[in-house]
Structures are given as C-alpha cells and as structure tokens.
Image (cartoon, rainbow, N blue to C red):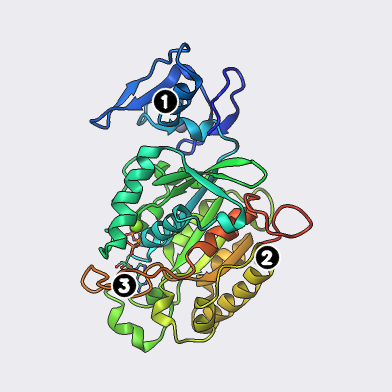
Amino acid sequence: MNTPVPGTAQEILCPYCLEVISYDEQQLFVRNDKELFEELRLDRRTSPLTLADTLHSAYQRCGNSGGGQAHYIPVPYLTNGSPLTVAMVGDSATGKTHLLTQMIAEIADGGLKRYGVQMQSVNPRDHQTFMTERVERLRSGTMLEHTRSAGEFAPFVDALLLTRAGGVTRPVAFFDLAGEDLRRTDALTRFMVGVDALIFVVDPLRALPMPYLDALRGQLGHTRGGDPAFQTVLDRLPRGGGQYLGVAAAVVVNKSDLVRFEPPVDRWLGEPPPPEREMAERFRMESQDAYAFLRCHTGQAWVSPFDSVLRCTLHFASATGSHDHEGRFPHGTRPLRVLEPLISVLAMCGLLDDGTEDGPAAVGL
Ligand SMILES: Nc1nc2c(ncn2[C@@H]2O[C@H](COP(=O)(O)OP(=O)(O)OP(=O)(O)O)[C@@H](O)[C@H]2O)c(=O)[nH]1
Ligand SMILES: [Mg+2]
Ligand SMILES: [Zn+2]
C-alpha cells in the first residue's frame, strides 16, 4: 500500500455520497474494539513502517455528511489511485450474495494471478470479517442469509487493492444491496449514478420456462417481464447524451447448475478461465451463446442490460454448483465460472490487460 504524502492528495468521488473527497490527515479515525470510530492523531515521529501499518487500517470521515449519516472511508481507498466500484444487480433471491462471495473467495485464492494481478485488502479487518462471515460460512456448507435492508446508506461489503504486473494499483469496492433496496429510487441508491461496473444477475427460476424448474420456483414464479431491479437501476444511470449507457456491465445467468443439461449451458460450464490473449474473443463467443439462449427461452426484458449498455458481456455461472437442501449444501459448494463476469468488467475498466494490441480492453465491444 502507498503511504500518503501530505499535500499530494488526489481528488476522488466518495463512494457513498458521490461528493469529491481527498485524503486529509485531520479527519482520520480508527475503529475500536466496540466497533466505534475514534479520532486518530498521527505522530510524525513514528517510523514510516509503523505509520503505513496504522494508516492501512485507518478511515477518513467524509466531510460531506451534510446533516445525514456520518460515513467513513478506508484510507487505502483514498490513497491508491483511481477507485473502481462494482455493484451486483438483481431482485431478491437471484443469488447476488452467493455469487459475489464466491468471486471474492476465488480472488483471495489467487484467481487473478493468471492475469498478472495481485490482491491486498483495502481494510484488513473488514476483509477478514467478510472472509469469516461469508466465505468460510459458505465453504462449511451453510447457505448465506438474505441481505438486510440498508437504511440510509449502502456501504460496500468488501474492497480490494488490485495491482497489475506493471505496478498500477486500483482499489475496487463491491456493493451488494438487498433486492428490495435496489428498487428504491431515493438517496440509498444514489451511489449507482457513479458506479463503474454492474453485474446483472439473472435467476433461471424467474427467467426460464422449463417445467422441471417449477418445483423450485417458490412464490415468485416464472415471468417473461424481466427483473424489476434491472429496470430501476438502468433508469437511474446517467445517459450522458448518447443512446447507450457508458457503465461497464456483465449479465450472468446464475444458478446455471439448474439448467446444466441444456445446450449450450452444458458446454460453457465446463470451460476453463480464458487465457489473457483470448479473453475478448472467448467472452464474445459466450455472450453470443448466452444472448441467444435467453432470447430463445424468455422475453426481451431479460436482456435489457445488453440492449441499453454500450459494453456488456453475457455469461453462464453457478455460485454454488447445486441447489441447497433446507439451507445447507451438505456436500459443500462447487462454484462454476464465477470469476469470468468480474474479469470481463475489470478488463472493460482497464484494470486487466485483455491481450489485444489496441490498448484498453476490447472486451465487451
Ligand atoms: N441452485 C442454485 N442456487 C443458488 C445459487 N446461488 C444462490 N442460490 C440460492 O439462491 C438463494 C438466494 O441467494 P442470495 O445470494 O441470498 O440471493 P440475493 O440475490 O443476494 O438475495 P437478497 O439478498 O434478498 O437480495 C439461496 O437459497 C441460495 O441457496 C446457485 O448458483 N445455484
Ligand atoms: Mg443478498
Ligand atoms: Zn461522502
């Protein structure tokens, strides 16, 4: 992690209120054992190593709280280059939390190393909490709970520092709201206006008509009308004058284990991660197949992100590899192709080298 040099602070957007914020040593806090924020006074006489270690777990209070809820941003988020925000989108129970958990688990296991990317946590304690409460829980075979409604602010659930082989580091923060919150159009979802990448999660139990899925659908049932959260979020994004939205996007047919015998799902689920040099081409092929699959079986509304966003890829994935049995995965979980949608949006945002000669990411074009 970079140790910030006074007077060189870069202006970035606060991920919560979207106002400009820059690193300010006078606004630092640490969290105590009771999870309360306490002011941090830096002693410049401490050794650079100790200072760097203190700052790694420090927070800065955003000065734009303006009567609303005070919010705190991890210092490494403000001092390591231009941050990137990624949000999961989909109605309740589409599998956003399981998918994001498995994505971060695979990154923690070194899943981005084959693309020359190293990871570090933005805040060690928050990352450890995420690993214990989500990743280890799921790996022990316990289904994760529905995400609680966020109230006034949507905090990111985890954030990582990703460093490319050339040495460029960027903080990446992940948002995972409850499905019902994503339908809100108030201040809670305002951060969506400034988000860099969206991962739209399609639930086969809602989208696909196959009769063998009926027993698993629950009360919500099948609909050709699309996911209401997709439309609310797409409507919220700034158009910037053009016909298409400029955000990076991936549409994931999640829970693909439920339709694993349908072609071409069967074929894609067995595919290994794409090598860097073939990434753009492989994602293009998968996108064509997934688009055709969705359009063959369901209404146009389910592919609305692809129709509205300029750079969008489509993917097949399964967060858990199988359906839960009364809240448990007795044989553990077996994530399938969960990292690909994230790799795709990271490439679109210039964080991965997609191996093409014309510089920033040809992925999604
Ligand atoms: N078969 C199958 N079930 C899955 C998969 N991923 C998630 N599920 C199930 O889908 C249900 C909902 O998962 P969540 O990840 O909590 O869904 P969510 O979209 O975060 O829901 P909210 O937090 O309410 O918005 C759980 O019962 C999971 O077991 C998958 O890949 N395959
Ligand atoms: Mg959730
Ligand atoms: Zn703020």
Q: Position of residue 199 (x, y in %)?
A: 50, 59
Q: Earlier in the sequence, mark 1 or mark 2?
A: 1
Residue 280 image label: 2
Residue 174, placed above or below residue 31? below
Quick one: which residue is furthest to the right in this view?
358
Residue beneath the point at 43% across and 15% down: 42
Could you tell me which secondary element the residue under label 3 belongs to?
loop
Q: CA distance from mark 2 to mark 3?
A: 36 Å
- What mark, if any, has residue 118 been given in the picture? none
Q: Amino acid at mark 1?
A: Thr
Q: What residue did someone put label 1 on?
A: 54
The Cα atoms of the two marked residues, 1 and 2, are separated by 40 Å
- Residue furthest left in the image: 326
For residue 19, say whether it is visible.
no
Please state the total of marks drawn on the protein image. Answer: 3
Q: Nearer the viewer, mark 2 or mark 3?
A: 2
Dot 1 or dot 3, earlier in sequence: 1
